Amino acid sequence: MIPTSIRFPPQLALARAVETLPGPDAMPGGRRFEPKWDGIRLAAVADSAISLWSRQGTDLTAAFPEIVEACGQLPTQSLFDGELVLWKDGRLAFEDLLRRMSSGVRSARRLAREMPASLVLFDVLAIEGVDTRRLAFDERRELLTLALDVVQPPLSLSPMTADPEEAAAWFEDMAAAGIEGLMVKGGAQPYRPGERDWVKVKRRETVDVVVAAVIGSIERPQSVVVGLVVDGKLRVAGRSASLKPAQATQLGRLLRPPSGKHPWPEVLPAGGLGRFSAREGPVHLTLVEPVAAEVSADSARSRGSFRHSVRFLRLRSDAELPAFE
């Protein structure tokens, strides 16, 4: 059985976001680079029965029968950490993966045939009844490589390199396939559930948006709510991270109340600012006169919206707004 030292649902190690790759001596035991997959973090338990758990502790076993079947290849009494992904036309398709997650048990096998998922494994918490979390990353990686030596798709071993030049090439070349960036881990690091020992560097780009509301007051906004024009309509596309005091002060001087009919309601339903805002409940907006702006955003999108908070850069009061109803 799985070691009793491991609690259920399994708690997974986390990563903190950084702007640039850490230096050569920043990670204990040296840097180890992996692609950052655009999928759903998953703990795969191979015991008397196979079970699949999301990072939030949701049991996904019934939703992905093809992954459950594939995990029969894994050593028993073992627990693996990885990313559930779905490929479509040579690119990661996060939207289809969300559809799989939200489907009922009755349709799970049909969807497994129509849009099969894959599981990319990058760590091992237990192997054949032994808790491996205290081992260094390099030792765990060796055990993981041996455990996956003969497995077949849809299971695979995530690539890993200690070569920063190879990692930099991945960062650029894998973007077309939907890889979000890089994960960086220390070769001597143990696996510490819930701790942000790992770091992640995501690809970011400057995006033209429309600021049409804020959270907080116009005079002292806490964050901006941005929109993108889709099919002639201004759609809510996400919100910014908390504004710095200087940004809030400057915006308070520049933003104005709406001068006419506004395209957005004053209250958005739960999840109205993205999948990760669903637990916040309804969101109250302070509507403003729409103005062009620039934000910095990572590559993760869902239905044309930003999946994570963006970083506000500046208003573009000199720029012409795109036409929308």
Image (tube, rainbow, N blue to C red):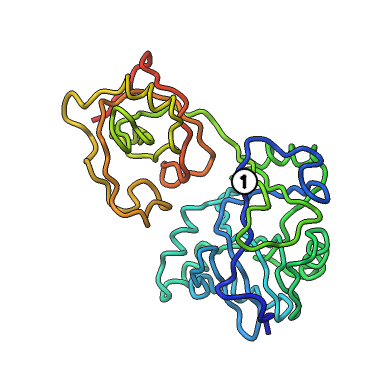
Quadrant of the snapshot with the N terminus: bottom right
Quadrant of the snapshot with the C terminus: top left
Mark 1 nearby-residue class (10 Å; few <14, some 14–19, many ≥20): many
In this rendering, the answer to whether 194 lies above or below 171 is below
- Which quadrant would residue 47 be assigned to in this image? bottom right
Q: Position of residue 196 (x, y in %)?
A: 63, 53
Q: Position of residue 213 (x, y in %)?
A: 30, 33
Query: Looking at the image, which is closer to me, 17 or 127?
Result: 17
Query: Looking at the image, which is closer to me, 167 or 243?
Result: 243
> At 29% from the left edge and 24% from the top edge, which residue is drawn?
323
Q: Position of residue 100 (x, y in %)?
A: 46, 63
- The residue type indicated by label 1 comes to Ile
Query: Looking at the image, which is closer to me, 140 or 66?
Result: 140
Residue 301 relative to residue 135: left or right: left
- Which residue is identified by label 1? 179
Q: Position of residue 6 (x, y in %)?
A: 64, 75
**Residue, far left:** 260
Please tell me whether mark 1 sits on a helix, a strand or a loop. Answer: loop
> At 76% from the left edge and 77% from the top edge, which residue is drawn?
130
